[in-house]
Image (spheres, rainbow, N blue to C red):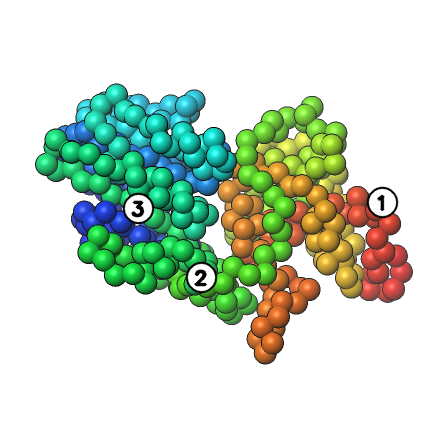
Amino acid sequence: MITRVQFNPSFREANFTKKRYRSMKGSAGSGKSVNVAQDYILKLGDKKYQGANLLVVRKSEATHKYSTYAELTGAINRIYGKQADKYWKTTLNPLEIKSKVTGNSIIFRGVNDAKQREKLKSINFSKGKLTWVWCEEATELMESDIDILDDRLRGILTNPNLYYQMTFTFNPVSATHWIKRKYFDYKNDDIFTHHSTYLQNRFIDEAYYRRMQMRKEQDPEGYKVYGLGEWGETGGAILKNYVIHEFPTEFEYFDNMRLSQDFGFNHANAILRIGFKDGELYICNEIYVHEMDTSEIIKIANSKGLEKNLFMYCDSAEPDRIKMWKSAGYKAKGVKKGPGSVKAQIDYLKQLRIHVHPSCTNTIKEIQQWKWKQDERTGLYLDEPVEFMDDAMAALRYSIDNKLKNSGVRILTPSGRR
């Protein structure tokens, strides 16, 4: 039996529009992606829309499994409950979702390179046509990518209930982005625009709301984009030398491995499992939790099988927590901090090629928006990172502690000694 699914009222018009371009900008936590996933599952499972098929696009194909595919399968489970398997077939290899009632399908693609883009031109379905395209994190895509996809939506539709539509969901990171020019500044009857924030999301939890209020105080510019969904500026990115893709995460694959941890409670407590191979850094796994005490986090680490024989580099400002991890059998040790240490760590990280496994969704969010502070008077960027939503990035910095020492970089402790 299908459950009556709950939607935020603010998305009602967006779900009913049949305009060719549905451009939905919003803050983090606005619920736009959850809404779009539910909207598609309801439509694709309805015989009224028989013959419709959905293509879901992100820049990196590997990120679908832990984002759009997870959102869509989550929507299936909420709507169909224990009968989900009766109505839907879901496969991981290849990633695909298919309605057993209508025969409508969902497939997933990336546009990382010319080969992947070329594959977009030859998409076909055994039943029906490609009618809908969902571009998640659309600001990561190039305008030429969208033109290729747009050209695929053509031909006569035999079902009168069907229509062609492209949906874009994204945080409006830059006021100079082509999406703003093409779908917001340009007025056209084929374009529907929508703006949502976490403040309108009635399903948001209180802890998330408090974290966003902290961001409002500590990172006003970032809050405009990620809190209010306003057009912002992407300048000042700290790390650009990273790639997101699938890779083996087993211990045997790497030359050496380690754990690193940034302690937190109201802000995130982040643990990273990191490997090094051929001089390159691999972020393999993450534990990323809020408002949990150390004993609870240790239980999570144990359940996930984190190796206790690996060194765990931690914030030295929390000696009591380090003792608790040691008592639990982990080789936890404090990372010395002093004047210039953060900048030295970042400079070292910039020299590496960094690989991020797509399962590390919170690390990906942080690394994409980690930026330098900006001088309000001059507009110039300072050699100091914004100290908000940087918990995984702090753990990443700690992870290279011993390598930084071995590199000969001189970092002073508060007492002035090395």
Secondary structure beneath dot 3 equals strand
- Residue drawn at x 16%, y 29% as measured from the top left: 50
Q: In front: 122, or 131?
A: 122
Q: Which residue is mark 2?
A: 176
Image quarter of the N terminus: top left
Q: Which mark is residue 406?
A: 1
Q: Give the Cα separation between the discs numbered 3 and 2.
A: 20 Å
Which of the 4 image quadrants contains residue 247? top right
Q: Are marks 3 and 2 in contact (CB under 8 Å)?
A: no
* Farthest residue, direction bottom: 377
Q: Which residue is mark 3?
A: 167
Identify the mark nearer the N-term, 3 or 2. Answer: 3
Label 3 environment density (alpha carbons within 10 Å; few <14, some 14–19, many ≥20): many
Query: Residue 377, percent across and down?
Result: 59, 78
Label 2 environment density (alpha carbons within 10 Å; few <14, some 14–19, many ≥20): few
Identify the mark nearer the N-term, 3 or 1. Answer: 3
**Mark in the foreground, 3 or 2:** 2
